[in-house]
Amino acid sequence: MTSERQEERRGAILRAARRVFVEMGLHTATTHDVARAAGVPVGSIYTYFADKDELIWASILAANKEETEAVLRDMQAAGTVRERVARALAGWYAYTIEAPGVAACLAEVWADAARRPLMRDIVARRRERIVTVATVLFTEGVAAGDLRPGFDVATAARALANLLDGIVLERLEGNGEVKLSDVERRAWLLFRS
């Protein structure tokens, strides 16, 4: 098999794994479920991934990378920092809150992070992607004069990541629908301090 074909198969397995883990949950889903969804023999999974944890890790990080890149592309089309933050929040909302099963899957990863190193790595990398995007946005906002001089970029970026994680938990609590407008309103409270 050519390396191009191997990469195609690996990509198909990763996309199928993400779908299966989100739909069934990390603990319920098996590598057999992923293989069936990818249309490959289960042994093919172990050609690319040592075990189920590594498959979970790789599939979630690949999805997170794709989503982050899509959000970054969309943000670039906006002008002011406020418009760019609004686009970033809309992208995050679509991929995390509106997408069925994603919030629950994320909560499973968080719950397992204390005991499973690869899950802990997913949590850390996901948070750092959010913090990095926010840091770039806020730094550009200060430079453009959209945010006040002296704005604490590092603290605001981490606060935004924490806020978004809290919104995921709120969504899971089921206390009504979390609307994008509510997410935007809460995010803008960070800029008032």
Image (cartoon, helix red, strand yellow):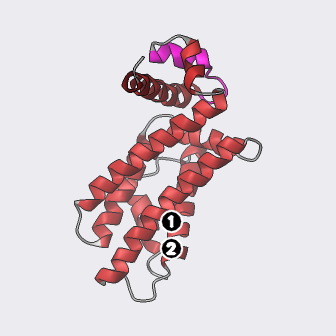
| Other residues around mark 1 within 10 Å, as few (<14) / some (14–19) / many (≥20) | many
User: Would residue 170 be seen by someone viewing this image from the given angle?
Assistant: no
Q: Residue reaching furthest front?
A: 2
Element assignment for label 2 = helix
* Residue type, label 2: Ala
Across and down, in percent, residue 5 comes to 38, 21
Query: Looking at the image, which is closer to me, 139 or 185?
Result: 139
Q: Quadrant of residue 172?
A: top right
Across and down, in percent, residue 92 comes to 42, 51
How far apart are labels 2 and 1 at the CA level?
6 Å
| Residues at circles 2 and 1 in contact by the CB criterion of under 8 Å | yes
Query: Looking at the image, which is closer to me, 101 or 57?
Result: 57
Q: Which residues are magenta?
A: 25-38
| Other residues around mark 2 within 10 Å, as few (<14) / some (14–19) / many (≥20) | some
Q: Quadrant of the N terminus?
A: top left
Residue under the image location 42 percent in, 24 percent down: 12
Across and down, in percent, residue 44 comes to 54, 16
Element assignment for label 1 = helix
The residue that label 2 is drawn on is: 156
Q: Quadrant of residue 105?
A: top right
User: Would residue 84 be seen by someone viewing this image from the given angle?
Assistant: yes
Query: Looking at the image, which is closer to me, 87 or 189?
Result: 87
The residue that label 1 is drawn on is: 160
Residue under the image location 47 percent in, 45 percent down: 64
